Image: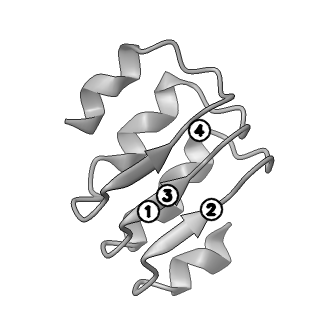
């Protein structure tokens, strides 16, 4: 998904049923204006959640149908 990193002004992104690796979420750091993010059914784990820490404008987050057990939620405060 590196191509998406060229869109720093993007405010909403919904990636459903696309297999994204935990490390593959790094491209999100280039999107500081992202307000809404959907990563449903992407096979993510708690190890991928630290990639979301810089998204300070984020107001809506969907992580349903992933492999997250909760320990990674501490990164989202």
Q: How many marks?
A: 4
What is the secondary structure assignment of the residue under circle 1?
A: strand
| First along the sequence among labels 2 and 3 | 2
Q: Nearer the viewer, mark 1 or mark 4?
A: 1
Colour mode?
one colour
Which mark, by number, is residue 37?
3
At x 31% / y 72%, what residue is drawn? 32
Percent of width and height locating residue 14: 62, 62
Which mark, by number, is residue 22?
4
* Residue neighbourhood size for the residue with mark 1, other residues' Cα within 10 Å, grouped as few (<14), some (14–19), many (≥20): some
Cβ atoms under marks 2 and 3 closer than 8 Å? yes
Cβ atoms under marks 3 and 4 closer than 8 Å? no
| First along the sequence among labels 1 and 2 | 2
What is the secondary structure assignment of the residue under circle 2?
A: strand
At x 69% / y 28%, what residue is drawn? 65
Q: Quadrant of residue 30?
A: bottom left
Q: Nearer the viewer, mark 4 or mark 2?
A: 2
* Residue neighbourhood size for the residue with mark 4, other residues' Cα within 10 Å, grouped as few (<14), some (14–19), many (≥20): some
Q: CA distance from mark 3 to mark 1?
A: 4 Å
Q: Which residue is mark 1?
A: 36
| First along the sequence among labels 3 and 4 | 4
Q: CA distance from mark 1 to mark 2?
A: 8 Å
Q: CA distance from mark 4 to mark 2?
A: 16 Å
Q: 50 and 40: which one is in front?
A: 40
Q: Quadrant of residue 33?
A: bottom left
Which mark, by number, is residue 14?
2
Percent of width and height locating residue 13: 56, 67
Q: CA distance from mark 1 to mark 4?
A: 18 Å
At x 40% / y 87%, what residue is drawn? 9
Position of 7 compared to 77: left or right? Answer: right
| First along the sequence among labels 1 and 4 | 4
Q: CA distance from mark 2 to mark 3?
A: 6 Å
């Amino acid at each position: 998904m590196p191509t998406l990193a060229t869109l720093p002004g993007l405010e909403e992104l919904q990636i459903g049923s696309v297999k994204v690796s935990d490390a593959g979420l790094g491209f999100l750091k280039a999107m500081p204006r992202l307000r809404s993010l959907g990563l449903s059914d992407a096979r993510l784990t708690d190890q991928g959640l630290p990639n979301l820490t810089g998204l300070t404008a984020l107001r809506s987050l969907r992580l349903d149908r992933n492999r997250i057990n909760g320990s990674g939620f501490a990164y989202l405060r």
